[in-house]
């Protein structure tokens, strides 16, 4: 019984994003749980300038590597039934993209009508991409100014992203409903 409990605790969820080359804007996305397939592969999109191991603010690439997801799922639509905490976006909800800001690469809520500087995103205005999204915890703990911000797993818009990973809304909701607090995403090149 203890062995089964230990195995359940050690079980991890991994979102796998495989792109055929660094220059690609197309990828596949699948979900694994306990090392086994739990969904996909589904078509996905990545950065308009491909993928990079040295992502920088505004460069249009998706960062390569393995990152934590969460701990909050956000969206302009109501909670689709996710296991993680959910925050429905309202006027004044921003993602701080200003490298000079002490809250760079963090969620911020300001009084509606107040603006943030730099490449900050007015999250509540970005549709359909931000119908629902999960934070890919790139450049997190510690946050390095200029290394990049607002890297999300969000709904597909029919084109390459500015550095995020996107997948069709139906598949995104399926994935977000499954994610637990220890979920990770692996973004990699697999020719």
Image (cartoon, rainbow, N blue to C red):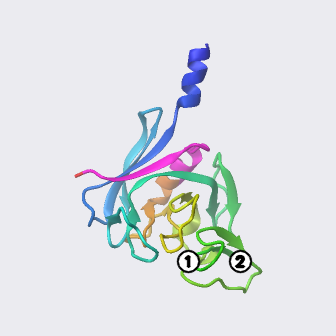
Instruction: Give the distance between the C-alpha atoms of the residues marked 1 and 2, in whole angstroms.
Output: 22 Å
- Of 146 and 136, nearer the camera is 146
Label 1 packing within 10 angstroms: few (<14), some (14-19), many (20+):
many
SS type, badge 2? loop
Question: Which residue sits furthest top?
Answer: 1
Residue at the image position 51 percent from the left and 69 percent from the top = 129
Quadrant hosting residue 135: bottom right
First in sequence, mark 1 or 2: give its number: 2
x%, y% of residue 167? 43, 59
On residue 99, which mark appears? Answer: 1
- Of 13 and 147, nearer the camera is 147
Q: Which residues are magenta?
A: 173-190
Question: Which residue sits furthest right?
Answer: 111
**Residue 40 sits above or below residue 92 on the image:** above
Quadrant hosting residue 19: bottom left
* 81 lies left or right of 151: right
x%, y% of residue 35? 42, 33
């Amino acid at each position: 019984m203890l062995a089964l409990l230990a195995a359940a605790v050690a079980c991890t969820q991994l979102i796998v994003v495989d792109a055929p080359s660094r220059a690609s804007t197309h990828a596949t996305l699948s979900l694994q749980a306990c090392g086994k397939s739990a969904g996909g592969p589904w078509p996905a999109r990545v950065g308009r300038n491909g993928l990079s191991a040295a992502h920088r603010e505004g460069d249009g690439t998706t960062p390569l590597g393995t990152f934590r997801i969460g701990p909050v799922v956000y969206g302009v639509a109501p909670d689709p039934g996710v296991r993680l905490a959910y925050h429905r976006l309202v006027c004044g909800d921003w993602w701080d993209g200003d490298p000079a800001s002490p809250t760079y690469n963090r969620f911020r809520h300001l009084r509606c009508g107040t603006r943030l500087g730099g490449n900050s995103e007015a999250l509540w205005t970005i549709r359909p991409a931000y119908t629902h999204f999960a934070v890919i915890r790139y450049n997190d703990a510690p946050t390095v100014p200029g290394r990049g911000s607002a890297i999300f797993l969000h709904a597909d818009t029919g084109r390459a992203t500015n550095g995020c990973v996107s997948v069709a809304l139906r598949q995104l909701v399926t994935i977000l409903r499954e994610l637990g607090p220890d979920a990770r995403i692996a973004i990699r090149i697999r020719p």
